[in-house]
Image (cartoon, rainbow, N blue to C red):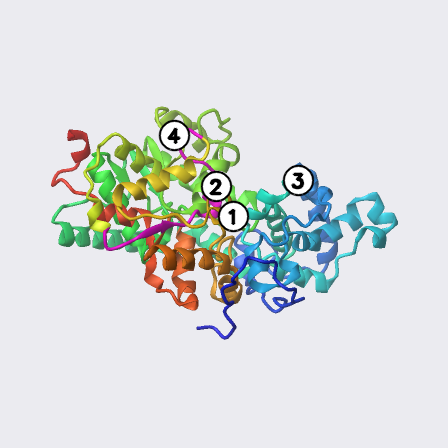
């Protein structure tokens, strides 16, 4: 356990007493020069960082009108103050969304508003100093970009967009974050966050196939680089090595087996996650997405299915049709996008979430399931932020809440939701999203998890909940680490498709679902 005090559960969800600068010491490791230059950023803090940072801020506010509106429209009403899990857990006023925004807004007002240029003190405008730059590096990495504050803001100000902009400015002057930038570089070079080469990937999934054979006596395929397959599965690389993520990958494979569809992973693009979003770089986000689309073209697939990863799904759902011009109705603007538009089957969503795929089979009675296989568990579900507040599933509003729960309830007999004020669009973040899932930020991760742990603890005590299901790789990894801090077992977190894997009855031959 790290050396800091874990917050205690509260009897009432009141606004915490302020502890100014309580988390001023928390700051992520600075990216090494090669982590920066691999992405086209300066290797270290440039000499003229002040002028370049101001210029970059001006560029972003001109390019993204929403960012400028967010910086202009806040009236300090206070609606967001107690909505951030990091403020609740740390009591640091700079973790109030409004105060965190103001770290950037003060500089914006000084340089890009008339009042700020003429009467800076009257409007809270300040010039960018070296000390403020360090505050940016600290506090904008104490935001998981979960967007919960925007749900309650009467003006709809999206703090995530402001955090993304601040991080992009920091990268542009050579002051980036090691964790995110190192990961993006690995994706560009090798194809996944882990730097796992193709042969290692193939050996890993071969081991999973052997596990299924040992446990179920059925040969279930885990194909890699199978040209002409119907489906390209893109999934977080945690699914290849971590628990409970691997159990979810086994669940996907069993569902594909029963559906009788051909599918494949790609060793070239074996990563569904897209950390370009976390650092606010649409160019990096685009490059990571285009790698997936190149793999889809090269393998001649007809569909792309996204595994259990919150921000992978958000990027695919919300950005593919604009950043990479892939999706029905998108204007294809590069070679691979044009080929993919013609290649993908228009009868299916582009992209499609694995929960949508599985739920469709369940609703049509195409999977034989035994929910009693999960009777040793009483389940609840964590709505992951990027799924809940930044995407959708299915063809109806709120499908992102309904469809995963439908899947769970089809394969489990014992299910209960957490408090209504902590789920759906009001869900609390796991505490580790937005590029914070790194050990150098363990304190903020644990303290930020407090509201979710409180809601979970309540259903554990009152409803006998034994396990928490999630459809996000970051959430699963975060809970594995923070649950013990709150005196709950780390293995109570499970994948949704791990539950499917437990309950599904396999036919010896692929396509059992199609014979029913």
Kindly indicate the quadrant of the structure image that contains residue 234: top left
Residue drawn at x 21%, y 55% as measured from the top left: 207
Q: Position of residue 297 (x, y in %)?
A: 37, 34
Q: Position of residue 152 (x, y in %)?
A: 60, 44
Element carrying mark 4: loop
Quick one: label 2 or label 1, which is nearer the N terminus? Answer: 1
Element carrying mark 3: loop
Quarter holding the C terminus is top left
Quick one: label 2 or label 3, which is nearer the N terminus? Answer: 3
> Given contact means CB atoms under 8 Å apart, are the residues at marks 1 and 4 in contact?
no
Q: Position of residue 122 (x, y in %)?
A: 85, 52
Q: Can residue 456 be seen?
A: yes
Kindly indicate the quadrant of the structure image that contains residue 196: bottom left
Tell me the magenta residue range. Answer: 375-396
Q: Nearer the viewer, mark 1 or mark 3?
A: 3
Element carrying mark 2: helix
Quick one: label 4 or label 2, which is nearer the N terminus? Answer: 2
Q: Is residue 80 left or right of residue 249?
A: right
Label 4 sits on residue: 349
Quarter holding the N terminus is bottom left
Q: Is residue 285 magenta?
A: no
In front of the other: 443 or 90: 90
Q: Nearer the viewer, mark 1 or mark 4?
A: 4
> Could you tell me how far apart the alpha carbons at marks 2 and 3 are, in whole angstroms?
24 Å
Residue drawn at x 66%, y 62% as measured from the top left: 135
Element carrying mark 1: loop
Label 2 sits on residue: 315
Q: Can residue 265 be seen?
A: no
Disc assigned to residue 155: 3
Q: Nearer the viewer, mark 4 or mark 3?
A: 3
């Amino acid at each position: 356990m790290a050396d800091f005090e874990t917050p205690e559960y509260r009897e009432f969800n009141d606004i915490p007493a302020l502890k100014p600068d309580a988390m001023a010491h928390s700051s992520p490791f600075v990216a090494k020069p090669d982590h920066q230059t691999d992405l086209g950023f300066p290797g270290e803090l440039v000499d003229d960082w002040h002028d370049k940072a101001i210029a970059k801020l001006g560029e972003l506010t001109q390019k993204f009108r929403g960012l400028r509106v967010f910086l202009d429209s806040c009236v300090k009403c206070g609606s967001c103050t107690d909505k951030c899990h990091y403020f609740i857990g740390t009591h640091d006023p700079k973790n109030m969304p409004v105060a965190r925004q103001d770290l950037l807004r003060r500089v914006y007002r000084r340089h890009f508003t008339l009042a700020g240029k003429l009467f800076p003190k009257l409007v809270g405008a300040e010039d960018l100093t070296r000390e403020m730059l360090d505050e940016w590096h600290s506090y904008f990495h104490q935001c998981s970009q979960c967007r919960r504050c925007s749900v309650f803001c009467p003006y709809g100000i999206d703090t995530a967009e402001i955090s993304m902009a601040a991080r992009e400015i920091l990268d542009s002057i050579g002051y980036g974050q090691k964790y995110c930038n190192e990961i993006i570089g690995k994706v560009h070079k090798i194809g996944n966050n882990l730097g796992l080469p193709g042969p290692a990937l193939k050996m890993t999934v071969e081991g999973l196939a052997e596990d299924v054979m040992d446990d179920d006596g059925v040969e279930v395929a885990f194909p890699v680089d199978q040209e002409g397959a119907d489906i390209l599965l893109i999934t977080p690389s945690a699914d290849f090595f971590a628990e409970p993520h691997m159990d979810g990958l086994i669940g996907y494979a069993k569902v594909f087996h029963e559906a009788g569809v051909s599918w494949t992973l790609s060793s070239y693009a074996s990563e569904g996650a897209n950390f370009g979003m976390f650092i606010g770089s649409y160019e990096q986000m685009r490059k990571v997405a285009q790698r997936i689309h190149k793999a889809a073209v090269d393998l001649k697939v007809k569909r792309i299915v996204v595994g259990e990863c919150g921000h992978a799904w958000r990027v695919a759902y919300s950005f593919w049709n604009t950043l990479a011009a892939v999706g029905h109705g998108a204007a294809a603007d590069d070679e691979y996008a044009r080929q993919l538009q013609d290649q993908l089957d228009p009868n299916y969503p582009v992209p499609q979430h694995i929960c949508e795929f599985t739920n469709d089979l369940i609703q049509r009675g195409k999977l034989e399931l035994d929910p009693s296989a999960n009777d040793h568990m009483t389940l609840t579900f964590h709505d992951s932020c990027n799924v809940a507040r930044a995407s959708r599933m299915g063809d109806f509003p709120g499908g992102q809440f309904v469809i995963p729960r439908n899947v769970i309830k089809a394969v489990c007999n014992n299910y209960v939701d957490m408090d209504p004020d902590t789920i759906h669009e009001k869900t609390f973040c796991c505490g580790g999203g937005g590029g914070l899932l790194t050990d150098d930020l363990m304190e903020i991760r644990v303290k930020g998890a407090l509201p979710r742990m409180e809601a979970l603890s309540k259903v554990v005590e009152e409803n006998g909940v034994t396990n928490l299901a999630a459809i996000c790789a970051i959430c699963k990894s975060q809970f594995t680490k923070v649950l013990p801090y709150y005196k709950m077992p780390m293995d109570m977190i499970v994948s949704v498709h791990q539950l499917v894997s437990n309950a599904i009855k396999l036919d010896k031959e692929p396509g059992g679902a199609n014979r029913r």
